């Protein structure tokens, strides 16, 4: 496994291949030198053989001359002396050949020189013997001694030549065995060379195979990735393009073509061909931004429109950035994102927003009408009522007085309603500024505001310590005013009202009942009274707008007070709950978050 | 300081005829030694005030919602002129909107009165305001004490 891993590592493989090639080179050169050596040995042997041959040839020529001379002496037949007798030409040729053959061997060259001298002397002896034999008065004794000397000399020459031949033979034999050994050596080298070459070939083949397989797998992966990328682009409404700044070559992704409203590769990817798919009004701007960016190589981010062949307008968000490809060429990559839906939604939202703003303005003016224009005549009515009551009371009949009192009650009720309406609309308005608010101070102010009412009812108010929270102060004051007024309103006739306002720990069962994630997240403020109370089943209904419980006519309400409370608590990301039962009083729980309100 | 031996001179600028009548009746019924001058719009008021020959009033009751020159416009003009620095300005309006209260407070009005809906209440308010120790009221003035309540 480790080996395979090493094998797969192309760096290691390259190193191994290099070493192997070096080894092959070494063996190859060794083989070559061995072959050369073998060749020179062979040459040496051949030379030696030829030298031996030439030497023997020389000897045989000398011998043949000797025989011819003897035959002549015996027979006196002149024909023995013909047939190129004592022709030195052949000898000279042999000597020359020998000189060439032994040129590299100084010792042997000397031997040949000695041989030449010997031969020269032998020829002198031939000539002297022939002269002695040819003379008319043959000195038989002198001739005999000459022949004897010739014979001895020939023998000596023979001995010399055989000595040389022997030494040559010895040399040949040595060289031959050397040759045998070198031949074996070369065979081993050659074998090794072949084996090694085969091994390298096999390894390379295997490696190539593995590489090809890896390449194929990588290619498959790339293909798959490309496909998934393509489908991702299609799903997400993305398209991308690239331009090589060196070659000015453009590449468009499949989905970019689709964004332009054509099939992938419908035209050759370049700037000129894509121009007609841009909205004519955007073309100048888009090409200016693009061309400028190619000059200063700054990233771009633009919104423009494609106009497809079906005359469909697509809003496109395009971002472009620069990078370098594998070859170090600067390229610009752009991603285009179809934001048509978002754009349309934004338009719709803007439209809705406009409408909402309009409605808000309407509400504002309605609010103004209620708070000022409606109250103005009402106030006049109330003023005139008070004038009449003061000045003309005595001249009214009993029925007139009754009617009058009803007018006053109706007018007052209308005033309360108008005030509540203004209060309610104020809780809806957007300008809410949250500041650190001490609820103790808010409650003190509330009780001061309600002092007359409290006095009239003879109520006892108990106050506990309240927290300081981030809130909209006037809304929280409104909340307390409404809740305390509520408790002051729904009282039992015979029992002096007792109202308590305090903050309390959130009980465990409340965590469950009101689905509070963490009881440390909220403050709980309790407003409890000993009033007439109501059935628990109405506990949700009482916080709804204009929902009034069916109570005695004397408990006149607008149906807005608790709806305002609900609204205010909601504005503060809290919630309001109530626990009550008939004649048992009511406990209002206001839960306000402790954290920052956003 | 304006000497109090003289009968107190009070101005009221209000475009509503009925309100002027109520105010005038209330002053009469209070039987205080006061001189009341009425104006039906901001222009009339300012024309009167800018006349250098007149004796400056002690208190000016100023309605906000008037045609032409509004009460706030008048207030700005008055507070921009150092000649009127001793004139107490009481805003006298139907509105009790935060914005009106804040704006007039910032522009230097001394007190903000919401028009009462009961005549006896009106008399009470006027009596209180006229008898108010302005120096004391002004030195401790803040947005809460600015809004007059009985």
Image: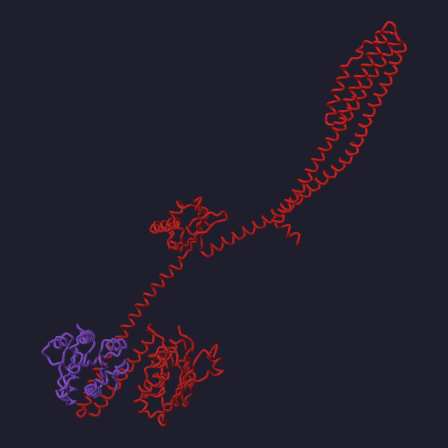
Q: Is residue A14 above or below residue A184?
A: below
Residues A173 and A260: in front is: A173
Q: Position of residue A247 (x, y in %)?
A: 44, 44
Residues B59 and A582: in front is: B59
The residue lying furthest to the bottom in this view is: A494
For chain B, give the colour.
purple
Which image quadrant is residue A463 in?
Answer: bottom left
Residue at image point 74% right, 37% down: A187
In the picture provided, is A468 more to the left or to the right than B49?
right
Can residue A386 be spotted in the picture? Answer: no
Which image quadrant is residue A43 in?
Answer: top right
In the picture provided, is A73 more to the left or to the right than A46?
right
Q: Position of residue B3 (x, y in %)?
A: 14, 86
Q: Position of residue B102 (x, y in %)?
A: 26, 77
Q: Look at the image and tell me in which quarter the C terminus of chain A lies.
A: bottom left
All told, the count of numbered labels is 0
Q: Position of residue B48 (x, y in %)?
A: 12, 77
Q: Which chain is red?
A: A
The residue lying furthest to the right in this view is: A141
Residues A220 and A115: in front is: A115
């Amino acid at each position: 496994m480790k080996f395979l891993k090493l094998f797969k590592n192309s760096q290691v493989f390259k190193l191994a291949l290099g070493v192997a090639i070096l080894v092959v080179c070494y063996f190859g050169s060794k083989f070559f030198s061995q072959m050369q050596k073998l060749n020179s040995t062979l040459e040496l042997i051949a030379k030696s053989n030829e030298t031996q041959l030439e030497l023997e040839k020389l000897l045989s020529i000398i011998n043949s001359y000797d025989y011819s001379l003897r035959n002549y002496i015996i027979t006196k037949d002149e024909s023995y002396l013909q047939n190129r007798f004592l022709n030195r030409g052949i000898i000279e040729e042999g000597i020359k050949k020998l000189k060439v053959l032994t040129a590299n061997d100084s010792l042997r060259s000397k031997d040949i020189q000695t041989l030449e001298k010997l031969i020269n002397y032998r020829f002198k002896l031939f000539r002297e013997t022939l002269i002695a034999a040819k003379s008319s008065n043959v000195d038989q004794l002198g001739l005999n001694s000459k022949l004897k000397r010739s014979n001895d000399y020939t023998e000596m020459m023979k001995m010399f030549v055989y000595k040389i031949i022997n030494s040559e033979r010895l040399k040949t034999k040595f060289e031959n065995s050397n040759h045998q050994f070198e031949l074996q050596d070369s065979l081993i080298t050659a074998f090794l060379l072949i084996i090694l070459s085969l091994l390298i070939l096999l390894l390379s083949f295997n490696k190539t195979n593995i590489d090809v397989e890896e390449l194929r797998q990588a290619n498959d992966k790339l293909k798959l990735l490309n496909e998934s990328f393509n489908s991702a682009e299609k799903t997400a409404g993305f398209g991308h393009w690239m331009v090589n700044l060196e070659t000015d070559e453009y590449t468009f992704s499949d989905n970019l073509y689709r964004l332009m409203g054509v099939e992938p590769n419908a035209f050759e990817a370049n700037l000129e061909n894509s121009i007609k798919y841009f909205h004519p009004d955007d073309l100048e701007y888009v090409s200016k931004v693009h061309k400028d960016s190619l000059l200063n190589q700054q990233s771009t981010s633009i919104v423009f429109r494609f106009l497809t062949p079906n005359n469909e307008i697509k809003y496109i968000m395009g971002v472009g950035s620069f990078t370098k490809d594998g070859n170090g060429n600067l390229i610009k990559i752009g991603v285009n994102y179809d934001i048509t839906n978002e754009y349309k939604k934004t338009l719709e939202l803007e439209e809705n927003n406009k409408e909402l703003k309009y409605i808000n303005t309407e509400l504002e003016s309605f609010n103004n009408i209620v708070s000022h224009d409606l109250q103005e005549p009402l106030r006049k009515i109330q003023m005139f009522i008070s004038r009449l009551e003061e000045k003309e009371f005595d001249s009214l009949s009993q029925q007139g007085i009754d009617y009058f009192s009803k007018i006053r009650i109706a007018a007052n009720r209308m005033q309360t309603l108008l005030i509540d309406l203004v209060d309610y609309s104020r809780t809806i308005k957007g300008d809410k500024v949250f500041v650190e608010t001490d609820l103790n101070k808010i409650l003190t102010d509330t009780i001061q505001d309600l002092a007359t009412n409290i006095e009239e009812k003879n109520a006892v108010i108990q106050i506990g310590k309240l927290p300081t929270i981030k809130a909209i102060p006037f809304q929280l004051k409104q909340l307390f005013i409404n809740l305390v007024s509520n408790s002051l309103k729904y009282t039992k006739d015979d029992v002096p009202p007792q109202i308590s306002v305090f903050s309390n720990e959130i009980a465990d069962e409340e965590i469950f009942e009101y689905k509070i994630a963490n009881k440390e997240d909220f403050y709980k403020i309790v407003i409890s009274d000993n009033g007439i109370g109501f059935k628990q089943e109405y506990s949700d209904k009482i916080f709804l707008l204009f929902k009034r419980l069916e109570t005695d006519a004397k408990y006149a309400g607008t149906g807005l007070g608790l709806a305002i409370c609900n609204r205010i608590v909601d504005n503060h990301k809290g919630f309001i709950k109530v626990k009550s039962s008939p004649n048992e009083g009511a406990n209002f729980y206001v839960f306000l978050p402790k954290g920052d309100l956003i | 300081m304006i000497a109090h031996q003289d009968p107190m001179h009070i101005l009221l600028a209000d475009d509503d005829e009925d309100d002027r009548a109520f105010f005038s009746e209330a002053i009469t019924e209070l039987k205080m030694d006061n001189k009341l001058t009425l104006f039906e719009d901001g222009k009339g008021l300012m024309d009167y005030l800018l006349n250098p020959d007149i004796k400056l009033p002690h208190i000016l009751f100023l309605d906000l919602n008037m045609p032409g020159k509004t009460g706030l416009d008048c207030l700005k003009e008055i507070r921009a002129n150092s000649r009127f620095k001793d004139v107490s300005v009481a805003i006298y309006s139907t509105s009790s909107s935060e914005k009106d209260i804040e704006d007039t407070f910032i522009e230097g009005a001394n007190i903000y009165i919401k028009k009462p809906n009961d005549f006896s209440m009106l008399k009470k308010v006027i009596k209180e305001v006229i008898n108010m120790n302005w120096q004391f009221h002004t030195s401790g003035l803040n947005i809460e004490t600015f809004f007059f309540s009985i």
